[in-house]
Image (cartoon, grey):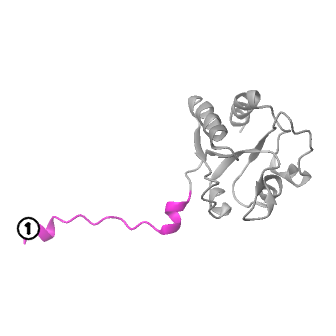
Amino acid sequence: DADTNARVELPCVRPEARMSVPANKILIVFDEPMIAQLYDLILRNQGFETVVADLAAEPDIEWWLNDIDLVVFEKNMYFPKHALTSDHLFSRAKGSISSIVLVNKADDPTPFDSGLQHRGLRKPVAPDRLKAVVQDIFANA
């Protein structure tokens, strides 16, 4: 009957496709949700597409790193589930990350992990320099 013919076939979406993030996005990884949201707002206002990692949910970190061009994260942040600091984690990350921006806590003088050097890591930036640094990276991409 006419009802059966009118049905629309929906395309099947693979579960792994749902988990990945569109390309040219900035991943924001911070301990404190308020800080993550602040950086998210700053960068979105500049026209960048952003993804804020939900640390409370702590999914497998690998999927965050799919199709991400730039990671902004807090220096020496600790991921209990992986027993790694953010510096070590992203130095091991595979994928399309072309650049990493570390945001230095004002009271954190410790050096960052040297394993990140091959990832186009910028020296840790002060929070108020983040917008300019990100703009510079994408302008020169």
Question: In the shown orientation, is residue 24 left or right of residue 71?
Answer: left
Viewport quadrant of the C terminus? top right
Question: Mark 1: which secondary structure?
Answer: helix
How far across and down, in percent of the image, does residue 131 sit?
Answer: 69, 30
Q: Residue at x 62, y 51 (%)?
A: 53
Q: Name the amino acid, label 1.
A: Ala
Q: Bin the neighbour count of mark 1 within 10 Å (Cα to Cα): few under 14, some 14-19, many 20 and up.
A: few
Q: Is residue 12 magenta?
A: yes
* Placement of 84 over or under 47, stated as above or below: below
Question: In the shown orientation, is residue 123 left or right of residue 8?
Answer: right
Question: In the shown orientation, is residue 91 left or right of residue 7?
Answer: right
Q: Is residue 33 magenta?
A: no
The magenta segment: 1-20
Question: In the shown orientation, is residue 10 left or right of residue 27?
Answer: left
Q: Quadrant of residue 6?
A: bottom left
How far across and down, in percent of the image, does residue 102 sit?
Answer: 79, 42
Q: Residue at x 57, y 34 (%)?
A: 44
Residue ID for mark 1: 2
